[in-house]
Amino acid sequence: MAVLLVWWIVAPTLFDDGWLWVELRAFDDLGTLNFYYDTWGVTSPLGYWLVWLGHWAIGSTSHLVFMRLPALLALLVSWLLCRWCLHRVVGGRPAPVVRWTLAGAFLVGATAWGMTLRLEPFVSLLVLASLAAMISFALVPRLAQLAIAVPAVVLATTAHPIGLVAAAPLLAAAPETVAWLRRGERRVLLALGTLLLAGLALALVLFTLDADLATRLSDARVAREGDYHAEPWWREHVRYTTFDVEGGGTVIRRLSLALLMLTVVAWLTRRRAVSTGVLVLPARSVGAALVLLAFVPSKFPWHFGALAAIGAVATAAEVARLLGERDEPRWRALRPILALAAVGGIALLSWRAPGEWGLPVLQETSWRSGFSPYTFLVVVLFVVVAAVASLRAGRGRGVPEGIVGEAIAIVSFAAVGLTALVLVRDAAVTAWSPARQNLEALTGRSSCGLAHQLRGEGNVSDLLADPETPAYLEPPVAVYFPCATIPTIEDGLVQVPRLVVRSPSRLLLDESDSPFAAVSDLYELRSIARGPRGVEVLSVGNGVPGFIRIDATRGDPTSRTSR
């Protein structure tokens, strides 16, 4: 929990954080969740119930550290539920090495994907709740557990397309469910059918909140025509081939994905003839979830954040299974050695990540200063020391198995710790950073974030802080300017911004389906200031001769003025 509290302050922002924050800020004007930057600004067909709850906390503040509070709470609850799941999976108190494996794997997933304004932390919690219910069902089958799992799936799938993975534990527990139905009477089947119908009714209610079914289906059709939400299931490989380019090229994010894959491989190659008493449900659920990911129509790497919690439980469960197989003569040496080699391979692959979060993060330091060959050798040395300590403790027979879990925990803690240290070091020597911005907000100091570091014509920070000056903030840097006022969307018209704050990424104004696409065509954009991390401020000048500029304002449409 202490690590999560530190990460709450120093964590870099996700590329999509500003995207969601601006959408939530516009929620009060529009009364619904809107594709503010793309898809022609139409209403999002999913997520109304969760965003309605979230906009009270996130959309009501301009400070990043307070916006992250819901995600922090979701992560803390997930950690407690992960521990509960592991106890049930192993059938008692887990061995210390298994508990450390759980902690390491959970921190990797939480720091890689969890500290975000996006919905993945909440979807991850719902997926974990579904897994917890099905673990309990696998131990003692009752309808009550299904009555928890089914609503969890409905809540997740109506919150975000990635919520589809919440059905993975139910699919993974299909053998146990079928066996229970066969043993039960007809009333059990009728009760299950009633539960499924109730779940369908709940899904329909949540899906049509604030709109009718025809409107929601129309919004979904339009959303599928956008560039970001139209990938078919057979192009799932895009999620992996563009993983680094789309923001997954960091050590902890590579490691998070690698642990998910390692868990599935361990489950597929397990000794089926050996009974260890450890449930296979968590690893089986991860495998099913990775398959269900293919049916999500967008292929961004941060969607793996929905699997972070169940992935941690599955990783620890497979280590516990390996410990239970150590008495098998043929496999006692081979399987742990292969597993340890796999852990070493994924650690080396992770250490070689370029270190990019999808946007520039560091100003004065580099990721190579923390993740170099020397630090990798230090991590290897810690693993060797752990093995020697186990031998001296008289557990020589269990070293090959136990050292696998110790290696996962050591690599995980090292990856998270070094990432945090590099961020803290950079924040200590730079004039501005997200960490500094968060600390200023916690101490009650007034700040306009990155605006104070802009250099150019006049006092740009005062211009950005002027509530009468709407500024179009690109998603990667939106949360760095808490004082700015975003353009409104009203009656199908967008307010023309006075300023455009862009990041080193491509200018989203040029997107063909952006509601603001006409701005760059009709108005002159002139650079007036620059800041760290490649941030640039553009001034929206007079319109092209022959066109009349119309600014949308709040209130009655007749109150708009031409300029």
Image (cartoon, rainbow, N blue to C red):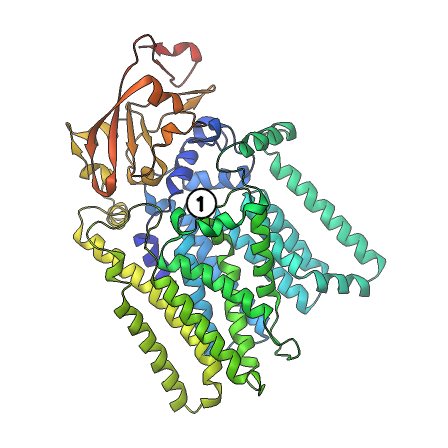
User: Helix or strand or loop: what does disc 1 sit on?
Assistant: loop
Q: Where does label 1 land, which residue?
A: 118
Quadrant occupied by the C terminus: top left
The picture quadrant where one finds residue 476 is top left
Counting from the top left corner in percent of width and height, residue 19 is at: 40, 38
Answer left or right for 283 relative to 511.
right
Determine crowd level at label 1: few under 14, some 14-19, many 20+ residues with C-alpha closer than 10 A.
Answer: many
**Visible in this render: residue 518?**
yes
Residue pictured at 24% horizontal, 40% vertical: 534
The picture quadrant where one finds residue 178 is bottom right
Answer left or right for 552 relative to 430.
right
Q: Is residue 103 above or below residue 254?
A: below
Residue pictured at 57% horizontal, 81% vertical: 325
Counting from the top left corner in percent of width and height, residue 102 is at: 47, 68
Quadrant occupied by the N terminus: bottom left
Which residue is more in the foreground, 463 or 369? 369
Residue pictured at 37% horizontal, 72% vertical: 410
Counting from the top left corner in percent of width and height, residue 336 is at: 49, 79
Counting from the top left corner in percent of width and height, residue 205 is at: 64, 37
